[in-house]
Amino acid sequence: MQGEAAVGTGLAQFELQHPAAITINTEGAFIDPVDTTHDDLNILLPNHDKRVSHVSIDIGGSLAKIVYFTKNHAGRGGRLHFISFETEKLEQWLSFLEQLAAQHPKDRRVRVVATGGGAYKYYDRIRSRLDVEVGRADEMECLIAGTSFFVERIPKEVFSYTDETPMLFSEVPGKYPYMLVNIGSGVSIIKVTGPQQFERIGGSSLGGGTLWGLLSQLTPANSYEEMLEIASTGDNRNVDMLVGDIYGSDYSRIGLKSSTIASSFGKVFKHRTEKFDPADISRSLLYAVSNNIGQLAYLHARYHEIGDIYFGGSYIRGHTQTIHTLAYAIRFWSKGEKTAYFFRHEGYLGAVGAFISQDGLIESPRSSPEAE
């Protein structure tokens, strides 16, 4: 809801407390099959014909995620675009927002809807740089709104994982209650009992920022993507102490395979004079952080009697090892009774939630099957 204009600036300040009247038509929506990389997964909205004059940005501790809409000038419809920047590279994402704002005519000035901690930290910088209206939407409300949008409206967005089928699309339950584990710089665990009915029931300071920070000190990697790439070539058995290293075989009485990690980095102390491969270190730390999050998620789901667990956040990045570890942890600890679900746009839950908080209600029921 728009409040009073800022004195002496000519820029409107407003808090988004109630949705606007504009709607998004998701009938026939699908993820563009031409986009092949994880960061280029546009969502086509072939039946949305209303003007969209805003962009959204979710500014977290590590990444700033932007969602914006472009209209198909050749006909009806358009598409949602997704792009992220490192938060500390302020000039890059401010310049990108500036470019988006410049594409709108003067009589249709763009609005920026911001969420996340950076919506407050960088609020004045965004307003002064862009000379546009800047609204702020609640972070948790945006996370839940974005989750609901993807689960209920976008076909082939949500998937589960098995070794045989790494991306298994099936009818998502979409029922309440469910649990959202959002993994950004840290971890938030949220119990959702209905539309915009939620409670933060836990969390952890050991999240994506932990992995990013440690690997930046222990490996030559210069970006998170590079760290994940290095981890994919590593062998954690050279760093971690396994059950087999202790027992010489499985410990079948309590259900532990010989390959189970007994102690992360457990071999480093005994061989501390050796130089360990950065790839092995990366894989070990990736497993350590992911296993911890997976077990924490399971314990909260068990306590609150929740069967469906959704994992979101930029920590995941579509990375197979991360998804495998989280899915395995839920399957192992719950003995197959609980299911882990993932998103193809996992890092944009909050940004999409901010985008539709401005647009308000969604116009159509669940979309038609994805175009081939």
Image (cartoon, rainbow, N blue to C red):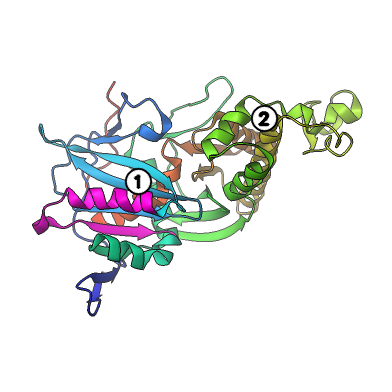
> Could you tell whether 134 is left or right of 303 in the image?
left
Look at the numbered disc 1 and give the secondary structure of its residue: helix
Residue 105 spot, x, y in % from top left: 11, 52
Given the image, on which type of amino acid does mark 2 rest? Answer: Ala
Look at the numbered disc 2 and give the secondary structure of its residue: helix
The answer to whether residue 345 is seen in the rendering is: yes
The segment highlighted magenta reads 91-116
Q: Quadrant where the N terminus lies?
A: bottom left
Is residue 95 on the magenta stretch? yes
Task: In this rendered view, identify the residue nearer to me: 24 or 285.
Answer: 285
> Could you tell whether 150 is left or right of 252 in the image?
left
Q: Quadrant where the C terminus lies?
A: top left
| Sequence order check, earlier mark of 2 and 1 | 1
Which residue is under mark 1?
A: 149
Q: Quadrant of residue 262?
A: top right
How far apart, in angstroms, are the residues tagged by discs 2 and 1?
37 Å
> Could you tell whether 180 is left or right of 27 in the image?
right
Residue 234 spot, x, y in % from top left: 67, 26
Given the image, on which type of amino acid does mark 1 rest? Answer: Phe
Residue 271 spot, x, y in % from top left: 87, 33
Which residue is under mark 2?
A: 279
Q: Residue at x 52, y 55 (%)?
A: 191
Q: Quadrant of residue 241?
A: top right
